[in-house]
Image (tube, rainbow, N blue to C red):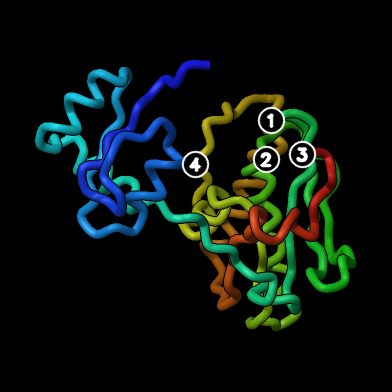
């Protein structure tokens, strides 16, 4: 198979023309002020190699240097003495249920049966607020709550759900629960932290319903 690109390295460990990004990257990665660029044909690459580097080359190099592998977040960072919440759904929008569990043991601390009809994020919002109310009822101001929904966490912080789900006869049950949760947030204060569960690094949250 013919090469689709040719890579010119003007400034790097070994300047030259390379036929793969892997070879090119080996010459420029970590090299201060590296200059390089890809070309569709060998002749263009050869002509460019004997001319001055273009502005585009510098821009591409900045991008390459900025691209760093993601840093793994160790499981040592997990606060096991916590509550984890998650949603189980049948469609999105669809039927929604949620629960909160002890992150360390997996024991179910509370749950809510099927709600007709809502979204995953709305269910996550209700689950977080339920967890905060659960802890407040027990005079526990230190145990954190884990959620894997950034959207729901923002809604909790704002004390307001910003969902595009239309309010109708079909969705009224969910919206009434949302109204009640929003009111709870307005009427109550809490010190418990709501923390993002890092699924990419830690696997599925402990309250996961296993329906993916």
Contact? badges 3 and 2 (CB < 8 Å): yes
**In the displayed structure, would residue 47 be above or below residue 175?**
above
Expressed as whole percent of the image width and height from the top left, the position of residue 13 reads 30, 54
Task: Give the spatial CA distance, label 1 vs label 2.
Answer: 6 Å
Q: Is residue 164 left or right of residue 204?
A: left
Which of labels 1 and 3 is toward the front?
Answer: 1
Which of labels 1 and 4 is toward the front?
Answer: 1
Task: Give the spatial CA distance, label 3 vs label 4.
Answer: 17 Å
Q: Tell me if mark 3 has few (under 14), some (14-19) or many (20+) residues whose alpha carbon lies within 10 angstroms of its own.
A: many
**Does residue 129 appear in this view?**
no
Would you name the residue on which mark 4 appears?
Answer: 162
Earlier-in-chain disc, 1 versus 4: 1
Contact? badges 1 and 2 (CB < 8 Å): yes
Element on which disc 3 rests: strand
Expressed as whole percent of the image width and height from the top left, the position of residue 106 reads 87, 66
Q: Tell me if mark 1 has few (under 14), some (14-19) or many (20+) residues whose alpha carbon lies within 10 angstroms of its own.
A: few
**In the displayed structure, would residue 123 be above or below residue 50?**
below
Q: Name the residue at 60% across, 66% down.
A: 73
Element on which disc 4 rests: loop
**In the image, which disc is placed on residue 96?**
3
Would you name the residue on which mark 1 appears?
Answer: 92
Task: Give the spatial CA distance, label 1 vs label 3.
Answer: 9 Å
Q: Is residue 195 left or right of residue 135?
A: left
Would you name the residue on which mark 2 appears?
Answer: 120
Earlier-in-chain disc, 3 versus 2: 3
Element on which disc 1 rests: loop
């Amino acid at each position: 198979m013919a090469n689709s690109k040719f890579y010119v390295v003007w400034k790097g460990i070994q300047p030259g023309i390379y036929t793969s990004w892997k070879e090119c990257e080996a010459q420029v990665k970590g090299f201060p002020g590296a200059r390089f660029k890809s070309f569709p044909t060998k002749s263009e690459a050869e002509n460019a190699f004997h001319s001055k580097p273009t502005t585009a080359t510098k821009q591409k190099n900045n991008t390459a240097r900025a691209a760093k592998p993601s840093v793994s977040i160790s499981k040592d960072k997990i606060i096991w003495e916590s509550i984890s919440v998650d949603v189980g759904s049948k469609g999105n929008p669809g039927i929604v249920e949620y629960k909160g569990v002890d992150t360390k043991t997996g024991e179910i601390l509370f749950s809510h049966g099927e709600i007709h009809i809502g979204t995953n994020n709305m269910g996550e919002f209700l689950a977080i607020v339920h967890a905060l109310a659960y802890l407040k009822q027990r005079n526990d101001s230190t145990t954190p709550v884990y959620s894997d929904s950034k959207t729901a966490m923002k809604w909790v912080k704002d004390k307001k759900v910003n969902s595009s789900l239309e309010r109708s006869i079909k969705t009224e049950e969910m919206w009434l629960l949302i109204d009640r949760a929003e009111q709870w947030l307005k009427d109550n204060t809490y010190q418990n932290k709501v923390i993002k569960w890092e699924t990419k690094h830690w696997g599925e949250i402990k309250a996961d319903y296993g329906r993916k």
